[in-house]
Image (cartoon, helix red, strand yellow):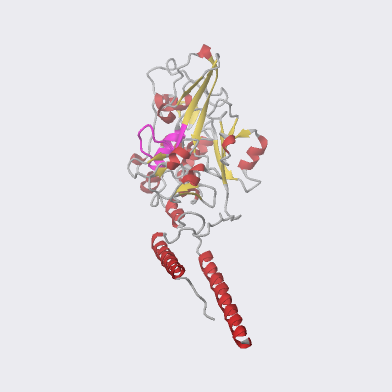
Amino acid sequence: MGNEKINSSRRKFLKSAVAIAGATIGYQVLKSSPVLISAAEPKDESLPWYGIVIDIQKCIGCGSCAKACKNENDVPVEPFFFRTWIEQYTVKNDGSVDIVSPNGGIDGFEQRVPDEDIFKSFFVPKMCNHCAKSPCEQVCPVGATFLSPEGVVLIDEKYCIGCRYCVQACPYGCRFIHPVKKVANKCTLCYHRLKKNLAPACMEVCPTGARMYGNLRDKNSELVKFLKEHTTHVLRPNLNTGAKLYYNALSSEVR
Amino acid sequence: MKHYIPPQLTRLALAFAIFITLFLVLRNFLVPDTFGEYGHYRGASLIENEQPEIHYSGQQACFECHRDIEDLKAQDVHSEIHCETCHGPGQKHVISSKATDILKPSSREFCGSCHVMNAAKSKNAVIQVDLKEHNIGKNCTECHNPHQPWEMKK
């Protein structure tokens, strides 16, 4: 009787020991596979963390950036596909705001508001904000859009299913569906150029130096220096997108 | 003393085991190789995004041959403007060296894209010309050297 009791409890012990060991091994196996347990973003300090500055006071609305972007990235020429474009805001004396962007600014601007009605007028170049907490990335159902370790929001064209969630999610209207490839398309901050130590095409051709990019981690970079010395704003800060595109002298009319 | 496991539990356990195995096998085939390497995306996509060819060579590539223009340009107000702002994408020309592979714009409309009058431009940023009055019928480059706009051709 006594022996049987001991045997039974020993068996129970062995069984639970095996179960625990099995569970631990199983957990380890699954853990090593990074898909099931969501992988953390690498915080590789050796890589740059890109930010952008656009100085509205310097922009003259020549459209070089929008043109160069289309050339460099083979963006379709139809006037509604843009990775970067320029908007002209004209605040009238009566307080109403006139916003135009004919062909993204590529063909230049013609002031349609008579001079005597203008309170102020300025150009706002727009492009992807390369948000650190980007809404477009969060809504992608297949993980085809992502924040690269350098802080650039990129698209995996082979993996995108063209569902258009991201196009709707972007609060800055920076995405479109490529009419030929049928997948999402957007500014990559010329990732292919950055990797060759070349400036993004729009910044290469900007005649007034209104656009700047740089490493936000490097506290001695031109960009960080500019941010320290100027009062800059991001677009739609209330949405907490972690936008890394900073505008100098941004007027409150800009949406 | 024999443990009694109800048959419905055994069947349930079996069903679970089959389901989990099936899930792991399917997942193995459906998830791409490099998915999750750096985050919730295909790691190989980073390399693919580096692949596209460049079209704008950057002005250092221009100056390797056109030293004289670099010196000329440095002396006047267009010194900060990179070559490809006006000459267009230059990588093709860098490779071929053919004059036909680069733009040489001279029209009033082209220069006007920067220099046309517009209330939105700050007065200090750029010199603004009224194209409807300024030397009508002439191309800009007939008088101005684009690399040195204030050295007038006479």
Left or right relative to B2: residue B95: left
Q: Quick one: B150 or A72, which is closer to the camera?
A: A72
Q: Position of residue A28 (x, y in %)?
A: 54, 68
Q: Is residue B69 visible?
A: no
Q: Is residue B135 magenta?
A: no
Q: Compared with residue B102, is residue B115 higher up or lower down, i.e. above or below?
A: above
| Highlighted range, magenta | A64-85
Q: Position of residue A170 (x, y in %)?
A: 48, 38
Q: Residue furthest top?
A: A116
Q: Quick one: A90 or A9, which is closer to the camera?
A: A9
Picture quadrant of residue B20: bottom left
Picture quadrant of residue A254: top right
Left or right relative to A200: residue A160: left
Q: Position of residue A44 (x, y in %)?
A: 59, 56
Q: Position of residue B40 (x, y in %)?
A: 49, 54
Q: Residue at x 61, y 83 (%)?
A: A5
Q: Residue at x 56, y 56 (%)?
A: A40
Q: Is residue A66 magenta?
A: yes
Image mark count: 0
Q: Residue at x 61, y 45 (%)?
A: A216
Q: Residue at x 54, y 43 (%)?
A: A131
